[in-house]
Amino acid sequence: MTNESKCILAPSCAFSGDTEKCHDRCPAFIQMHSASGRHTLAGLPSEYALIDLATAPPRKDQPAVYKFVDAYVATFERQFDDKPAIKSAYLYSDEPGTGKTTTAAGLINAWLRAHYVGAARLGRQPLRKPAEFFDLNEYQTAYNLAAMAGDAVKLQALTKRLNEAARVPFLVLDDVGIRSASEAFRGFVHAVINARLAAGRPTVYTSNIEMGDLADVYDARLADRIRDNCQDLPFIGKSKRGLRRK
Ligand SMILES: Nc1ncnc2c1ncn2[C@@H]1O[C@H](COP(=O)(O)OP(=O)(O)OP(=O)(O)O)[C@@H](O)[C@H]1O
Ligand SMILES: [Mg+2]
């Protein structure tokens, strides 16, 4: 059985489609997709796990976004430079279901691919965690539950996750416009974004709130930080959720 459809390296692999050479025991597949593989550790939700930007459903409906996305992905090669200066991006639409998270997932996969291929070219060991998908809704719920239960062990694990999110070379902060942000939660988001900006690490945000209105959810300082070297990418049209299943 071929791995073409389940290995995110397939688009840049000479063996994809070759049933002799594309299989589950392929070392590259294992490094990406085993339980401790780079793609697995990136933590993409299963419904977005194998999104490839070339074939992503939103591509045809969001031509302006994908024009930038294609140029953006080309800059991922610079991740091994001393000063890569890779931009951040803000994927926005007021309307839900326009393809923001799908596109952000595709960007993670593109980053992982560029990382794996680039490391191999340079004769380096790829990082254990080159990219991460961070769902802020899910995180805030987990944090609130642990705080309410006074669960010190869970809170410690959640703090560790935050520290990792601050350090990972490429991060997706999914749903940064979360409206129910508590004081403590806002502080966490600040810390992660500030640390990433200070280190020049790119972040992809998805949001249902315009970049200019973020000050209403967080504060002017965080809204300002997010705007730093960041491409605003408005998604157009109505929700496409459920369209593929019809
Ligand atoms: N242009 C499109 N054509 C077809 N299907 C699409 C398109 N955009 C998104 N979808 C599908 O709609 C569903 C929702 O997409 P996604 O989760 O990326 O939206 P979103 O913009 O992140 O929504 P939300 O604002 O609710 O977080 C997915 O199943 C996705 O494949
Ligand atoms: Mg989303």
Image (spheres, rainbow, N blue to C red):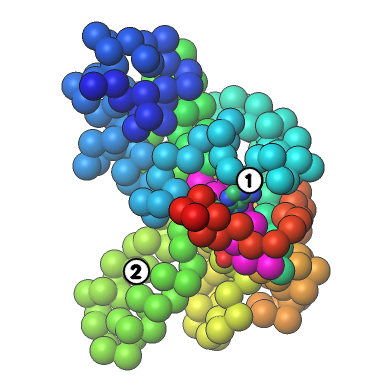
Q: Is residue 219 visible?
A: yes
The residue that label 1 is drawn on is 58
Q: Residue at x 36, y 39 (%)?
A: 39
| Residue 104 on the magenta span | yes
Q: Residue at x 25, y 80 (%)?
A: 152
* Quadrant observed for ligand 1 in the rendered image: bottom right
Q: Residue at x 69, y 40 (%)?
A: 60
Is residue 114 found left or right of 9 in the rendered image? right
| Residue 161 on the magenta span | no
Coordinates of residue 212 in the picture (x, y in percent): 80, 69
- Dot 2: element: helix
- Numbered range of the magenta stretch: 95-105
Question: Disc 1 residue type?
Answer: Pro
- Between 153 and 115, which is closer to the camera in this rendering? 115
Depicted 150 relative to depicted 156: above or below: below
The image quarter containing residue 237 is bottom right
The image quarter containing residue 195 is bottom right
- Dot 1: element: helix
Is residue 128 found left or right of 183 in the rendered image? left
- Between 180 and 192, which is closer to the camera in this rendering? 180
Is residue 161 found left or right of 133 in the rendered image? left
Asked whether mark 1 lies closer than 8 Å to ligand 1, one says yes
The residue that label 2 is drawn on is 158
User: In which quadrant of the rendered image does the N terminus lie?
Assistant: top left
The image quarter containing residue 208 is bottom right
Coordinates of residue 20 in the picture (x, y in percent): 24, 9
Depicted 3 relative to depicted 90: above or below: above
Depicted 135 relative to depicted 137: above or below: above
Q: In this view, which residue lies farthest toward the left? A: 25
